[in-house]
Amino acid sequence: MQKTQRQLQVGETIKRALCEIFIRDDLMTIMNNHITILKVDASPDIKKAIVYLNIFGDEKNNPKIIKKLNSLVPNIRYELAKKVIFRIVPEIVFMHDDNEKKASLLEDLINKESLKYSTKNNVDFDKKKK
């Protein structure tokens, strides 16, 4: 479903404010893993916001880090309310965004299949047609 301009603006505003909060409260590094806020999706009624994070470091700690951040949501919402002017500060849910990992796996799969195809059919994809 297409996001409205209002949802996109609210999401970007929340993202910027959360970045400031994370930097100020030293939440960018948890359990020796670096955290990056990728995007914020606001619901159509702006009552809920899903914050997608990318976590660099030991992947075993990702669920623990997400759980820790979700336990800090009341404090983060309090700080967010000081930074943004909304009638209602949305409920926040932190989620790990693993699209980059999925894209990498998909790319590896495509490369493997194209290699099988090229060796089977003696096709060289690197040669340009003239």
Image (cartoon, rainbow, N blue to C red):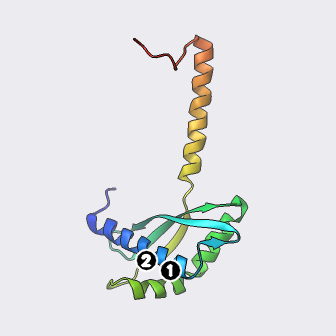
For image coordinates 43% across by 71% down, the residue present is 15
Above or below for 120 versus 47:
above
* Residue at the disc numbered 2: 17
Type of the residue with mark 1: Ile
Q: Find residue 64 and report its horizontal and vertical position in percent.
A: 68, 70
Residue 21: image tag: 1
Q: Which mark is residue 65?
A: none
Give the camera-side residue of 129 and 98: 129
Query: Left of 30 or right of it: where is 96?
Result: left
- The amino acid at mark 2 is Ala
Where, by quadrant of the figure, is residue 97 drawn? Answer: bottom right
Q: Please state which of residues 55 and 93 is positioned toward the viewer in this rendering.
A: 55
Which residue is depicted at the point 45% across and 16% down? Answer: 128
Q: Secondary structure at mark 1?
A: helix
Residue 100 is situated, as x and y percent measured from the top left of the image, at 55, 50
Identify which residue is drawn at 34% across, 56% down. Answer: 1
Quadrant of the drawing holding the C terminus? top left
Q: On the rendered structure, is 39 left or right of 122?
A: left
Judge the density around disc 1: few (<14), some (14-19), many (≥20) Cα neighbours within 10 Å.
some
Mark 2 Cα-neighbour bin, 10 Å: few <14, some 14–19, many ≥20: some
Would residue 3 appear left or right of 48 to someone viewing this image?
left
Number of dots carrying numbers: 2
Q: Farthest residue toward the left?
A: 5
Q: Quadrant of residue 121?
A: top right
At a point 70% along the width and 71% down the height, the residue shown is 31
Residue 11: x percent and y percent?
Answer: 38, 69
Report the side of 18 relative to 86 (left or right). right
Give the x, y percent position of residue 117.
Answer: 58, 19
Is residue 80 placed above or below 106 in the rendered structure?
below
Residue 1 or 29: which is nearer the viewer?
29
Dot 2 and dot 1 residues touching (CB under 8 Å): yes
Which type of secondary structure does the marked residue at label 2 adopt? helix
